[in-house]
Image: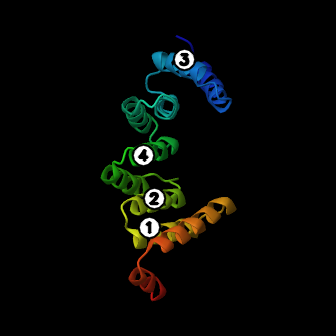
Amino acid sequence: MESLSFYENQFIKADALISEGNSADAKELLEDILSQYPDFGKAHNHLGWIYYNKLSDYEKGVYHYKLAMKFDSKYPAPYLNYTYLLIDLGRYAEAKEHINFTLANLENADNSTYNSELGRMAEYEGEFAAAYAYYKEATKNALNPNFIDNMNANMKRVKDKMSIFEKLKLKFK
């Protein structure tokens, strides 16, 4: 069996292949890594991403994201990727529970992004005042000007969807 260091380098190659749009070769490389090191959390995350985003195999995406979180519990990427997958599948209750768990337990969780996703779910559910509040919260610790611009656009969009009474409530908060 080759050393973990070799497979960490293989992982870096797989990551580069994904960045280059070569998901097929990246998938093969990740599967090879996992055949030798089945507890390599980052490889599970990337494989989950390929299954979810490139192959639309959501069940395998969920499977690999859960393994990634289990085996590398401090690696933030699978927590966020799993959130996106749950929301895209319309599994909002699970997504909210997962976000709450992540924000409470993951030391380096991106609070702004998770609030943005809570806003997205609230907007999908027609809870425009809640969506507005989440988007506003998302801007508080954000540093990326494009992200802040997107949150401001989201707040404007949901405000336009609100009833007159919801808009009045915003003015008095």
Residue assigned mark 3: 28
Q: Secondary structure at mark 4?
A: helix
Disc 2 from disc 3: Cα separation: 34 Å
Disc 2 versus disc 3: nearer the observer: 2
Q: Amino acid at mark 3?
A: Glu
Label 3 near label 1: C-beta < 8 Å? no
Q: Which residue is mark 2?
A: 120
Other-residue count near label 1 (Cα within 10 Å), few / some / many at <14 / 14–19 / ≥20: many
| Residue annotated with mark 1 | 131
Q: Position of residue 50 (x, y in %)?
A: 51, 30
Q: Specify the farthest residue to the top.
A: 1
Crowd band around label 2 with a 10 angstrom C-alpha radius: few (<14), some (14–19), many (20+):
many
The residues tagged by marks 1 and 4 sit, at their Cα atoms, a distance apart of 17 Å
Q: Secondary structure at mark 1?
A: helix
Gap between marks 3 and 4 measured at Cα: 26 Å
Amino acid under label 1? Ala
The residue shown at (42%, 70%) is: 128
Q: Spatial distance from mark 1 to mark 2, Cα to Cα? A: 7 Å
Mark 2 or mark 3, which has the lower sequence index?
3
**What residue do we see at 44% from left, 35% from top?**
68
Q: Identify the image quadrant of the C terminus.
A: bottom left
Q: How many marks?
A: 4
Decide which of tag 1 and tag 4 comes sooner along the chain: 4
Residue 46 vs residue 134, the one in the foreground: 134
- N-terminal of the two: label 1 or label 3? 3
How was the colour assigned to the protein in this rendering?
A: rainbow
Whether pointer 1 and pointer 2 mark residues with C-beta atoms closer than 8 Å, the reply is: yes
